[in-house]
Image (spheres, rainbow, N blue to C red):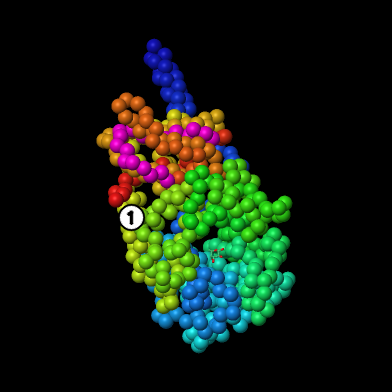
Amino acid sequence: MQKMKANKVLHGLVLFSFILLFSCSNQPVDPPEPYEALPSERQWEWHQLEFYGFLHFTVNTFTDKEWGYGDEPNDIFNPTDYDPDQIVRTAKEAGMKGLILTCKHHDGFCLWPSDYTKHSVKYSSWKNGEGDVVKDISDACKKYGLKFGVYLSPWDRNYADYGKPEYIEYYRNQLKELLTKYGPVFEIWFDGANGGDGYYGGANEVRKIDRSTYYDWPVTWEIVRELQPKAVIFSDVGPDIRWIGNERGIANDTCWATYTPHGIDGKKPGPGSIKYKEGQSGHRNGKFWIAPECDVSIRPGWFYHKKEDERVRDRENLMDLYFKSIGRGASFLLNLPPDRRGQIHENDVASLRGFKADLDQLFKTDLAKDAKLIPSNVRGKSKVFGPQNLTDNNRETYWATDDEVTTPELVLEFKKPVSFNVVSIREFLPLGQRIDGWAIDRWENGEWIEFAKGASIGNRRLWRGVQQNTLKVRFRVTGSPVCPAVSEFALYHFNWN
Ligand code: FUL
Ligand code: CA
């Protein structure tokens, strides 16, 4: 009798451990298979930055132009109260993670003492030819913990050989200087504006180049890979980051990180010769991971003009751009043009301060952290892929479902009614951009009411709208060819004016 009892207990124990093993198994469960085009390591790093700045500063600041012709005397570059620390500190205080400087714009004037030209700060009376803006800005970036990036205009309206093969060598030599003398570079910006009239060493003529072949970009990109392997390369065609196809700082509501560049007139796609408007949305199932970047200036022009002092974007406008760039899966590259003193103007500083205060208030408290999270499915019932990964502030962890569960839902239950007007969702990008439809509902009078929906998510999707007051929120994946992998679901409340 005693033995029978012991046997039963043993049986029970075995059964119990089996149930335990299968219900909340700690057995390793494989992560989902990656889906189609994937970000490289350097792109995945870059996706974290989200918000960084552009500095447009050169002879144009002093001639009041947007595009210099290339005949500007070197001495015209003469900031009267130059303060690189103030410039970089302003960016830092605005929450920017990096700065990209126009080391050379279309006019060809170099902000560093290049060995290859006499059209630079070295031959200017400013600081008796001892000045080096690239050094000053990159040093200040190091001091403030910002990343430093380089803009080097492919079009050069000063150089006598522009349009000939010799210029390409010159251009690459300059690039090598910038990529070897100033420390780590996080992004290199290759502009698409290419060829036209200019000074060209005194020729004063129009020079047309074939944009799809002249620069032989793949060779230049190789130089970047060799000298700065961590830097992402921006151009109309990537290979890492693409232009969003407008200078208003706005991505399409549906915007994919995947993209297949298409050339014009049957030619190979290249910077300045591409169906660039397609960059606004990218392509679902595009061949490559070429992530979108939204560039826009805080003023109407890219360079400083006194007449635009009263036309600086205000904090609400900047917040709007934040939602239409970062909130649609792109990055936000906001230009701050230093003025003739060599500082960021007070009006721009004031706007940025207001904007940063708003951002801080908005993202201070993630209300989803108070919720009980109830997913319709968890991959292999494993904690590794559980819903707690959505509110842990860690982009490396994610909620995933079993392979066959492609349209799961997640219910957030609150003890007390929650009020929010902003939602933030992120996919785990190393597994590709998976989701192509989502919706969110609130619980009201015993039923679900849908209040938000969209197609792409990607790096981040921000929704904002009228305040929702509810005890329950439901996030639904409405379309996905494979099981989703979501790394964040957050709710915020902001006091919009
Ligand atoms: C354009 C340039 O022509 C503008 O001057 C500016 O630098 C902008 C960011 O890119 O293509
Ligand atoms: Ca996470």
User: Looking at the image, which residue sits at the far top?
Assistant: 1
Q: Residues within 10 Å of mark 1 (few under 14, many from 20)?
A: some
Residue at point 47% right, 47% down? 328
Judge whether 398 appears above or below 320 on screen: above
Magenta highlight: main SS: strand
Judge whether 192 appears above or below 75 on screen: above
Question: Magenta stretch containing residue 111, yes or no?
Answer: no
User: Looking at the image, which residue sits at the far left?
Assistant: 416
Ligand 2 within 8 angstroms of badge 1 C-beta:
no
Nearest the viewer among 391 and 468 is 468
Nearest the viewer among 212 and 372 is 212
Locate residue 80, reporting x and y percent: 42, 81
Question: Magenta stretch containing residue 467, yes or no?
Answer: yes
Locate residue 483, reporting x and y percent: 53, 35
Residue at point 44% right, 19% down? 11
Amino acid at the residue labelled 1: Asp
Locate residue 160, reporting x and y percent: 68, 78
So how many labels did they put on this image?
A: 1
Q: Please indicate, yes or no, whether residue 183 appears anywhere in the rendered image.
A: no
Locate residue 291, reporting x and y percent: 55, 52
Judge whether 65 appears above or below 388 on screen: below
Nearest the viewer among 393 and 463 is 463
In the displayed structure image, the side of residue 276 where residue 164 appears, left or right:
right
Q: Please indicate, yes or no, whether residue 245 appears anywhere in the rendered image.
A: yes
Give the structural element (helix, strand or loop) at label 1.
Answer: helix
Judge whether 447 appears above or below 301 on screen: above
Q: Which residue is mark 1?
A: 358
The quadrant holding residue 115 is bottom right
Where does the magenta region start and end? 462-480
Residue at point 48% right, 85% down? 127
Quarter of the N terminus within the rendering: top left
